Amino acid sequence: MTTEVLKAPLVVEFPFTRSLGPVQSAFLTGLREQVVLGVRTTDGRTLVPPVEYDPVTADEIRDLVQVAPTGTVTTWAWNHAPRRGQPLDTPFAWVLVRLDGADTALLHALDAPGPDTVRTGMRVRVRWAASRSGAITDIACFEPYDSTSGSQVSGHDGEFEDMVTGIVAPARLDYTYSPGRAQTAYITALAEQRIVGERCPSCRKVYVPPRGACPTCGVGTAEQVEVGPGGTVTTYCIVNIKARNLDIEVPYVYAHIALDGADLALHGRIGGIPYDQVRMGLRVEPVWTEGGRYPDHYRPTGEPDADYETYKESL
């Protein structure tokens, strides 16, 4: 019987907080004030966006120089379907723009009617965001610009009041995860309160959870083997910090458990026993909640502790 391979949408999201050195601080504060700053290297090149160390010589560089908010497209790619969080919610071009006065290009969005209106060498200018806070998004996007001459700049020295010293950037990754054939069978069996691994045809070891191949021999695995349900605690840790969105009181124990018949320990929470009584060699069994698709925790079976020699290979 062929089992349909599972898949599910997953999102990894977290705020990324970082402090800024003097060069990045001046660059982002300048954007807030509608000033674009670069940094001049010892050989006279102007880098935009600026960096604190010369990418060629690794010398520290601090010589800030203002460049124009106008420039030339050096290369581009059309984005037919903007995604969440991108600069524009209508189709646009990603462009590398060498601003007038700079020797390197800045990546940003170009608001254009269609791909037939974009070309390498076209002139563009910054469209500033209506509300600015000291971030790259203070440049809302670039827009076509008819003039071949650059804008006049005042030669700003990079000194501002209320300098931006740190930023918080939201990081987010949306993707569809598929566990593959082997883990799909494992997850399906868990929903039936069974624990299934796969045996390597070469070394004969049984891996739980299965990965579809033996990590030692490098050959594919297909023979399913039901293991457990009992097992032995091999190693463990006591958790004293409560995790967000996890309704478990601390302290609790998380352990590696070598299930009977398996050659690889899996991890699970230990319950039904005070945390300070959990030990290596403790015999445990899974506890399933009604409707649960995996064991809620493992509890002691009441059997004598396993001899170290029986589980030492699973440490």
Image: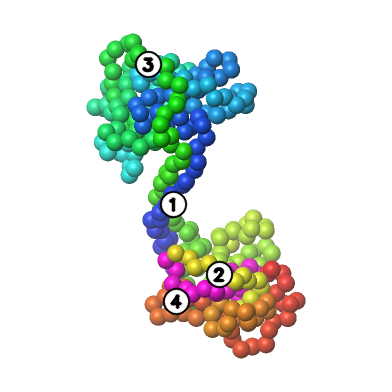
Circle count: 4
The span from disc 4 to disc 2 (Cα, nearest Å) is 32 Å
The span from disc 3 to disc 4 (Cα, nearest Å) is 70 Å
> Which one is earlier in the sequence, the residue at label 4 or at label 1?
1
Q: Position of residue 273 (x, y in %)?
A: 57, 83
Q: Secondary structure at mark 4?
A: loop
Instruction: Look at discs 2 and 3 and give the one toward the viewer.
Output: 3
Q: Please report the bounds of the magenta region as a residue range.
A: 245-269
**Which one is in front, 205 or 177?**
177
Residue depicted at x 70% and y 74% = 311
Q: Which residue is mark 2?
A: 240
At label 1, counting other C-alpha atoms closer than 10 Å, the crowd grade (few under 14, some 14-19, many 20 or more) is: few
The span from disc 1 to disc 3 (Cα, nearest Å) is 38 Å
Residue depicted at x 63% and y 82% = 277
Residue 153 bears which disc, if any?
A: 3
Residue 14 bears which disc, if any?
A: 1
